[in-house]
Image (tube, grey):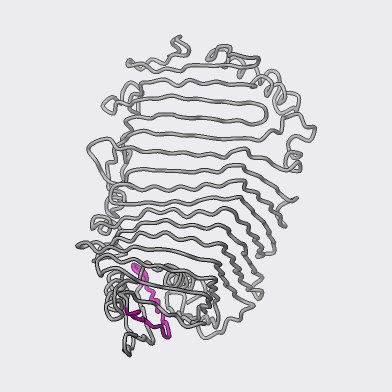
């Protein structure tokens, strides 16, 4: 097993000691029983040596082993010891030794490997309260640091200089509520971390490959809800969601920075990033899936042997969001797609490549798109058999019923295009416009600065006057003068007969 395989094992151990969601009950013995039931339901074989003394249950060689679904691989995690302490007031404290060397081993098609995840912590409190069917966890720590050590790759020892992983978290606090209801276990969690620092590196200098990734995040927060069926098969996503599996969560931060360095195949690369905050969100259930990412004041600097000069980019705003159905339906379902790359600026060295004379305005550029609509999926895309049938089918996997363009914005090099509109689609009529359902609706467009941009392109020698003429003629055909100088506007309509009109004049 290679270092790459250990990454998955490390992630499991990180979840074990940084998120209290997997631990619950009201007494020490019941807590241990619940751990076994819960971890067993998600695919782990669980064992430990138990010693009860008064209200304290000490677990030694707490072992979790799992076969990786759909792969010829397995991973084993061993926690040397920890204690579950009844506090005499209906609560249980989880006491973790300091340091705690969590042993991780695994095997797969690439071989076998092992390592220790050393957990050190200060000011740590784990406390469980509530009832067996409605449990609340509270966790806090002044600092928790996770360090990979004692790595092996097959029979070969991997030194700290060859592979490094350190993750440090300051001022963590969180609360988790777990509700057991019939065949579902629902976990609701909120957590904050004052600061996160990470340092990851791999040095395979024998083969000429090296890489490092280090950085920090500030003001980290997590809010998440997960519903987990008691009987869970991680290898069958379709069955999981039908049984009630669902998740919805947001990870956010108020600031961050990172540095990346790498070399291989005779080339080098380096980059730094910084931002003033961002977020990542994800949700999924049997009917829908959504994914979102945002960023604020993102700065990127990159250089390398294959890059002729340092590249600098800045983005005031970054946004991507998609919300769509995943289940077959006989009735239209909502979908949404949004994208924003706001106020992009580049270094003068990049501008100098194609505009050394400075003909083009170098104002920040923006691309924004906001779409909503309705459609019908013809397949359950989480079902592997239906997904394969969808991939092999010559027909589209969905029907589009309506599309609303809430915002279209393209702004760069002195020109600005905006648009809003709405269309419906008749999927029973594939003849009016061959190969697609007949649309009906309109879009209103406005274009500013187009003629000035064309003049600048001519001055730069990119196009000639003769080559620019068709573009000017097209603008004259499809647009009318706008409200200001060098401004155009146009309303493009498609009526019930399939006719296309521009500003009331039929063009097709």
In the image, residue 474 lies in the stretch drawn in magenta: no
**Residue 349 image position (x, y, % from top left):** 76, 43
Depth check: give the residue in front, 456 or 181. Answer: 181
**Residue 375 image position (x, y, % from top left):** 31, 35
**Residue 461 image position (x, y, % from top left):** 74, 27
Residue at the extreme front of the image, as rendered? 89
Residue drawn at (30%, 66%), measured in percent from left and top?
135
Q: Quadrant of residue 180?
A: bottom left
Magenta span: predominant SS is: strand
Q: Quadrant of residue 313?
A: top right
Q: Quadrant of residue 190?
A: bottom left
Q: Is residue 371 left or right of residue 131?
A: right
Which quadrant, please, contains the C terminus? top left
**Residue 222 image position (x, y, % from top left):** 45, 57
In the image, residue 71 lies in the stretch drawn in magenta: yes
Residue drawn at (53%, 78%), measured in percent from left and top?
120
Residue at the extreme left of the image, as rendered? 182
Residue drawn at (76%, 24%), measured in percent from left and top?
459
Please give the range of residues in magenta.
68-88
Depth check: give the residue in front, 241 or 146. Answer: 146
Q: Is residue 105 above or below residue 21?
A: below
Depth check: give the residue in front, 307 or 159. Answer: 159
Q: Is residue 48 above or below residue 306?
A: below
Q: Is residue 242 above or below residue 23?
A: above
């Amino acid at each position: 097993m290679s270092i790459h395989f250990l990454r998955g094992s490390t992630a499991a151990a990180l979840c074990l000691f940084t998120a209290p969601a997997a631990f619950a009950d009201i007494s020490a013995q019941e807590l241990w029983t619940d751990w076994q039931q819960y971890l067993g339901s998600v695919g782990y074989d669980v064992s430990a040596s138990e010693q009860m003394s008064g209200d304290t249950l000490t677990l030694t060689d707490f072992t979790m082993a799992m076969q990786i679904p759909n792969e010829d691989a397995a991973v084993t995690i061993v926690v040397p010891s920890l204690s579950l302490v009844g506090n005499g007031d209906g609560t249980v404290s989880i006491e973790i030794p300091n340091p705690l060397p969590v042993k991780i081993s695994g095997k797969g098609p690439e071989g076998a490997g092992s390592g220790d995840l050393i957990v050190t912590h200060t000011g740590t409190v784990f406390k469980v309260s509530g009832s067996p069917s409605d449990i609340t966890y509270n966790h806090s720590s002044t600092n928790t640091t996770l360090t990979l050590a004692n790595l092996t790759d097959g029979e070969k020892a991997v030194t700290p200089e060859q592979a490094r992983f350190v993750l440090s978290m300051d001022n963590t606090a969180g609360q988790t509520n777990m509700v057991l209801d019939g065949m579902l276990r629902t976990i609701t969690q909120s957590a904050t971390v004052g600061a996160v620092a990470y340092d990851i590196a791999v040095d395979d200098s024998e083969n000429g490959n090296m890489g490092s990734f280090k950085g920090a995040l500030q003001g980290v927060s997590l809010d998440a809800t997960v519903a987990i069926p008691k009987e869970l098969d991680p290898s069958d996503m379709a069955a999981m969601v039908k049984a009630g599996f669902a998740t919805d969560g947001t990870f956010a931060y108020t600031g961050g920075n990172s540095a990346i360095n790498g070399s291989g195949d005779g080339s080098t690369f380096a980059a730094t990033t910084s931002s003033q905050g961002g977020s990542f969100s994800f949700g999924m259930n049997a009917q829908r899936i959504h994914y979102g990412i945002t960023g604020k004041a993102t700065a990127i600097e990159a250089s390398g042997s294959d890059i002729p000069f340092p590249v600098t980019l800045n983005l005031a705003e970054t946004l991507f969001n998609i919300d769509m159905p995943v289940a077959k339906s006989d009735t239209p379902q909502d979908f949404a797609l949004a994208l924003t790359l706001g106020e992009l600026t580049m270094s003068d060295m990049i501008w100098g490549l194609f505009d050394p004379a400075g003909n083009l305005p170098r104002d920040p550029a923006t691309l924004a798109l906001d779409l909503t609509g309705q459609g019908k999926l013809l397949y359950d895309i989480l079902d592997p058999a239906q997904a394969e049938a969808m991939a092999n089918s010559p027909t589209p996997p969905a029907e589009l019923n309506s599309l609303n363009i809430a915002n279209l914005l393209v702004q760069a090099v002195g020109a600005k295009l905006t648009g809003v509109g709405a269309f419906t689609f008749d999927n029973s009529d594939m003849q009016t416009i061959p190969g697609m359902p007949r649309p009906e609706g309109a879009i209103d467009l406005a274009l500013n600065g187009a003629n000035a941009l064309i003049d600048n392109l001519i001055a730069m020698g990119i196009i000639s006057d003769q080559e620019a003429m068709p573009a000017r003629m097209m603008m004259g055909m499809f647009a009318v003068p706008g409200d200001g100088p060098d401004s155009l506007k146009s309303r493009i309509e498609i009526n019930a007969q399939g006719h296309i009109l521009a500003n009331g004049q039929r063009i097709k």
